Image: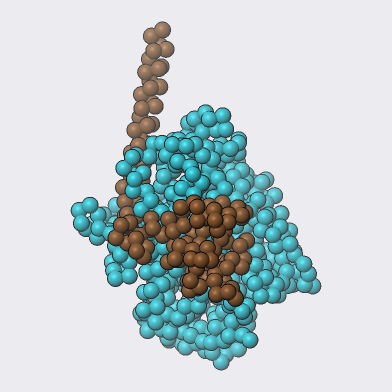
Amino acid sequence: MIEVVIDERCTGCGTCVDACPSDVLEVGSDGKARIARQADCQTCLLCELHCASDALFVWPDCEAPAGITAAQALASGQLGAFRRNSGWGEHAATHSNQHWRMGSIFERARLQAIQIAAQKSAQATSAQAEETTR
Amino acid sequence: MSQTGSTDVLVIGGGLAGTWAAIAAAREGAEVVLADKGHCGTSGVTATAGPGHWWVPPEARDAAVADRLKRSLGLGDPDWMRRILDLTWTSLPTLRGYYDFSTDDEGRPFYRGLRGPEYMRAMRNLALAQGVRILDHHPALELLRHGDGSIAGASGLALRGERPWTIRAGAVVLATGGCAFASRLLGSATNTGDGLLMGVEAGADLSGMEFTNYYTPAMAGTNMARSMAYSFARWFDADDRELDIPNGPDVTPHLARALMAGPLFCRLDRVPEDIRRVMPQVQPNFVLPFDRKGIDAYRDRFEVTLHAEGTVRGIGGLRVTDQACQTQVPGLFAAGDAASRELVTGAISGGGAVNSSWALSSGQWAGAGAARLALGQGARADALVVASGRAGLRPARAEGPVDLKAAVQVVRDELNDYGRNIFRRGATLAGSIRRLDDVWIDLADHARGEGRASLRTREAAALVAAGRWSKASALARRESRGMHRREDAAGPDPRFAARQRAGGLSTVWTAFEPTGAQAEVA
């Protein structure tokens, strides 16, 4: 769930407030984004992706808040990691979108499964042969 | 103060199907309003995923359709399959300039698969460029009808300021997504079946609602349901004994049985080294829970769960009755996961690819059809209309407190539970129906909310309604076919080689379609 907004990074632009599909965030009276309805968060991570100043931190547990503090989020080294891996904004040149490889990765998995099944059946056959020889 | 307005076409839902619908309607010259419960661009299951499409070159299409038709187990339709293959092939390249298509290792543009956040960002921008007016955080709560039964628009709630809205329209497209039955499936929190409930209240019916038992693995405690990396997985029980579970399309029942016996663990140590290196840039959200929790995904053993997909990668939804995806209600069109996908998937899941092609295609057909209808007759904005919403909006008896959390929990218990939903039996299904009926009666008789609470009340009603249609359909299909698995009726029965309709509110009904041509391919 969304855990914390890093106030010193938040510019109050409101992009995350607009982008949240569950309407969890709002801009507070201090001009910073704040978590208004945490229980509605569905842990989709898209607020992080849309925050150009990497001021939001989502923890992967989706059932209940984990109580992560701003200091913990900053220390994690994970602020902005999702946006970086996605190649958004300034990361476009260094982190290209490799999603197109997905089909071939699935195909590798399918072939691996066939190979493993063949190995297993060969082992079973040789074990059976051994049993018969005894 | 309430907002009111009128338009030619109103599209409800701004995910993959809704945006394609809005764009197609605008291209026909219609004025289009798109109302999204969340934010068009992040709403819906596409935005968190990475949909491939059913992408087949013209010369290979006959073979692809023949193969898919065989696997549809008697419920598919080859003409609809061809139609979505054709339209997918010509539509995706039109996103150039909005989506930064990758080139493959040979330098050819790769159109087939698009990453979700970038795909939906592109769709939003294209819709805006076509002049579509987007209303974010504007959930629809009910449809409006003319005296002759045709659709006249919709009413809902603007979340900011909690103000009601009413939009009169010449035609409405329901693109509200599938119903994930309140599971923790990634991206599905707003997919509560609202369109199914609104559609049935307005006179539409459903098809394929028994096919609601597709599941996807995720790290326990997280919603990160992804199938790619897990297709390399080795599976272990609590004592770290490796389980003999072969990966492949039929892995779910094996994983479910293991989970019913105790905690289930996984190792991804068979993922090849080169794939590990590119994974963060292929699927950035997959690696995130591991990185944050300090788990080495490819070395450490970690606990996993299965998340129910309901009708998302299940199949059922509103039944379309013509080539423009109109329902049996004049002026009401259905697209994407809100519509039944049996025509193109039959009794097995459309997975990501066929479902995405269906969303892209049904969206455009529905949008264009709605535009032609609306431009032909106008919005009739002065005609008297009737509001069609019932449960959660207009209680049948005295308004009173209803425990919505408890109601949603019953839906989770009955529709997500592995034993009850994957390994189905007549007696268990009948028990689920009784419990869901009790919750429905309470909701329909007494529930009503104001502001945001009105949305939560309607969502609960829609979840329960969709659950009742699913269980009734599963009970009536006394056989096993495709994903629908009856432990008390193994194997397909030729008498049931037909699509099954469902509907009804106070009393749920189901009816098999006359077989005819369908029986020949069963």
Labels in figure, total = 0
> Which chain corresponds to the colour brown?
A
Q: As rendered, which of B135 and A113 lies closer to the eye?
A: B135
Q: Is residue B269 visible?
A: yes
Q: Position of residue B291 (x, y in %)?
A: 46, 48
B346 shown above or below A127: below
| Residue name at image x 47 percent, y 37 percent | B300
Q: Quadrant of the N terminus of chain A?
A: bottom right
Check the rendered structure and report the hue given to chain B: cyan
**Image-based side of B19 in relation to B491, left or right:** left
Q: Quadrant of the C terminus of chain A?
A: top left
| Residue name at image x 56 percent, y 29 percent | B239
| Identity of the residue furthest to the top in this view | A134
Q: As rendered, which of B291 and B491 lies closer to the eye?
A: B291
Q: Indicate the colouring scheme.
A: by chain
Q: Position of residue A47 (x, y in %)?
A: 49, 64
Q: Quadrant of residue B373?
A: bottom left
| Residue name at image x 41 percent, y 36 percent | B269
**Image-based side of A119 in relation to A37, left or right:** left
Q: Position of residue A109 (x, y in %)?
A: 36, 41
A4 shown above or below B11: above
Q: Is residue B484 visible?
A: no
| Residue name at image x 39 percent, y 58 percent | A84
Q: Position of residue B177 (x, y in %)?
A: 50, 64
B139 shown above or below B250: below
**Image-based side of B183 in relation to B356, left or right:** right
| Identity of the residue furthest to the left in this view | B106
